[in-house]
Image: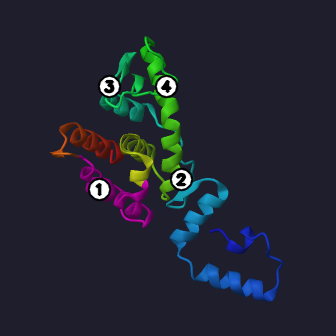
Amino acid sequence: MIKLKDCAIYYEGSTHQDDAWEYLQQNTTDEILETFASYYRGTKVEAGVQETEPTHTSQAGIDLIKSFEGLELSSYYCSSNVLTIGYGHTQSVEEGQTITEHDAEELLRKDLMWFEQEVSRLIVPVLTQHEFDAIVSFTFNTGSGALASSTFCKRMNDGENKARCFREEFPKWVKGPNGPLPGLVRRRDAEVELATS
């Protein structure tokens, strides 16, 4: 277990400092201490086993996202009148541009980097690779603001059972202007299945 006073930059060994740190140490739950320790060391910790936090989407996550985004190897104007190519890529796209399927996946991986960083920033508990992948897919689809303000994020960070959070919260994000959209229902179901596998 980490000793909080060992992390303090202004600790000078004074008696009153020792008393304050000891009080804090004794009145902080083990779960909070473990979470603090994981951030202090640059990793997250679960069940007493230090793990490296996933920071990139695995191939399973990439494949799930690809299956719902659709692939266009020639540039086109999307419904928002923005030039788009590959799996929804919009940066530096030119009219008449063509790419390979490999290029499209590489562009997707680059596009996912922002969302991967946002998931790592917003979700406190340690995640398995599949959980991380599912949340990245969700965030890529809904936006990081949606994740940040979601009950899912709050419940996860409050330490609730992760599988229950996925099963109960992800299916809420399927509504279009006229009710649930079948494509979003399938996507949320696939994300929940991946996260809890």
Is 13 placed left or right of 142 in the picture? right
Answer above or below: position of 169 versus 54. below
- Mark 2–mark 1 Cα distance, whole angstroms, equals 19 Å
Q: CA distance from mark 3 to mark 4?
A: 14 Å
Q: Which mark is residue 107?
A: 4
Q: Left of 175 or right of it: where is 104? A: right
Query: What separation in Å lies between label 4 and label 1 (alpha carbons)?
Result: 29 Å
Q: Determine the CA span between mark 1 and mark 3.
A: 25 Å
Of the numbered discs 1 and 3, the one sitting upstream in the chain is 3
Mark toward the start of the polypeptide (4 vs 1): 4
Q: Amino acid at mark 2?
A: Arg
Name the N-terminal-most of marks 3 and 2.
3
Q: Secondary structure at mark 1?
A: helix
Residue at mark 3: 70
Q: Residue at x 52, y 31 (%)?
A: 110
Tell me where residue 27 appears, x and y as whole percent.
57, 82
- Chief secondary structure of the magenta span? helix
Q: Position of residue 193 (x, y in %)?
A: 29, 44
Picture coordinates of residue 175, whole percent (x, y): 22, 47
- Kindly identify which residue carries mark 1: 169
Taking the spot 20% from the left edge, 45% from the top edge, the residue there is 177
Circle 4/circle 2 CB separation < 8 Å: no
User: Label 4 near label 3: C-beta < 8 Å?
Assistant: no
CA distance for labels 3 and 2:
28 Å
